[in-house]
Image (spheres, grey):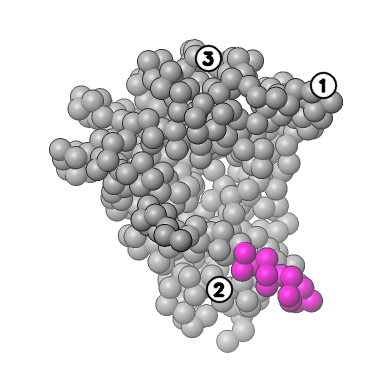
Amino acid sequence: MRVSARAQAIEPFFVMEIAKAAQTLAATQSSLGKMIHLNIGEPDFKAAPLVQKAAQEAIASGLTQYTHASGTHELREAISNWYLNRWGLNIEPARITVTAGASAALLLSAMALIEEGDEILMPDPSYACNRHFVSVAQGVPTLLPSNAKNKFQLSASQIQSHWNERTRGVLLASPSNPTGTCIDFEELKRIHSFIKARSGITLVDEIYLGLSFGEQEAQSALAIDEEIISINSFSKYFNMTGWRLGWVVTPLELAPTFDRLAQNLFICPSSIAQHAALACFEPSSLDLFEERKAAFKARRDYLVPELKALGFEVPVTPDGAFYCWADCRPLYARLGVDNSWDFTMKLMQECRIALAPGRDFGQHEVEHFVRISIASSLQDLQEAVSRMRQLWSHP
């Protein structure tokens, strides 16, 4: 059967391929020790107790049927109140479309705003799947090399120099996956000002917004202008990965378009997940999320110096999320490899540590980087450092 060219053009998500290889290795050679998974951005924390309880109560009460395509009014209102109470932003509930995860929000945004041939500028490195959302909408993802000087984010001058008659806008992320860095807020203002003057799109992935570790970085792009489109999620800060629930904030005039697309593509997000997510905004849940955020920061503060001591180069300390973007070239000779894919495979085989090789995240020098997740426990991070130190000590 013929497969569409669109589907053939989508590369595998190599993070998940590594995950499968790690699971197979762990299952077939379990006697050699536990596999430490530092490859996937999934918090080791589970959904908050009140969220779990709310899901059980929703099922028991029969709240399991279709909801409005854009989400329940109660959840959209709760998200709106969160923006007001946490970020000081007045976001009307009508501007919020609740989605089946941030992935659905990105897909809706791409389908609503991108025409065939439209060019969307993105930093290199950036989250692998984001460029595929652009491609599926028949747009052209254009990755611009970024560097440590700009914290692996794009600058206004870089966007200006690459803008042409086909360019439609940008897709940025702050904090970013895979680098964990935040874009400078004043720079983001300059970027949006330039794009708005050309009637373009400023689309910002903010799914790690709640996991910003510095007060300066903890600002939503929505504070700049109502025309910015922001993607968010219950997966990361709210620890609800498998519940598949997210949202997108759009200008009010775009809400009917997003609703119409959601009706056709998804019918609605999970009703049970929506009812459960209301409990995320209870004071005790929010206190718990802040405690967990502090735990992520403590893990970062432990791991970054240890990675440098092991010989990795960490060009920028992450501002948020739960990733370290590390250059492993200084360690190639120790393992007899010359790229991060082979480095990752060797590390997995030799000391049962799974990392994410850089090849997923772009084209500019990514073959020499690995993404290391701090979403695992501090104990796992400590054990991973110990195993690598022991491996390095043997010729």
Report the residue at 77% width, 29% height from top. 55
Spatial CA distance of label 2 from label 3 is: 46 Å
Q: Residues within 10 Å of mark 2 (few under 14, many from 20)?
A: many
Q: What amino acid type is highlighted by mark number 3?
A: Pro
The residue mark sitting in front, 2 or 1, is 1
Report which quarter residue 190 is drawn in: top left
Identity, as a three-letter code, of the amino acid under mark 1: Ser
Q: Residues within 10 Å of mark 3 (few under 14, many from 20)?
A: some
Of helix, strand and loop, which one carries label 1? loop
Horizontal and vertical percent position of residue 198: 20, 27
Choose the circle earlier in sequence order: 1 or 3. Answer: 1
Q: Is residue 36 left or right of residue 347?
A: right
Horizontal and vertical percent for residue 30?
A: 77, 73
Q: What residue is shown with label 3?
A: 93
| Residue in view at x 28 percent, y 32 percent | 191
In the rendered image, which residue does mark 1 sit on?
61
394 up-or-down from 169: above or below: below
Residue at screen point 80% across, 28% down: 59
The amino acid beneath tag 2 is Met
Q: Quickly name the residue at label 2.
A: 345
The secondary structure making up most of the magenta span is helix
Residue under the point 37% across and 52% down: 6
Looking at the picture, tell me which residue is in the foreground, 251 or 310.
Answer: 251
Give the quadrant of the C terminus. bottom right
Rendered image: mark on residue 124 = none
Q: CA distance from mark 2 to mark 1?
A: 48 Å
The segment highlighted magenta reads 20-32
Answer whether residue 30 is magenta in the image: yes
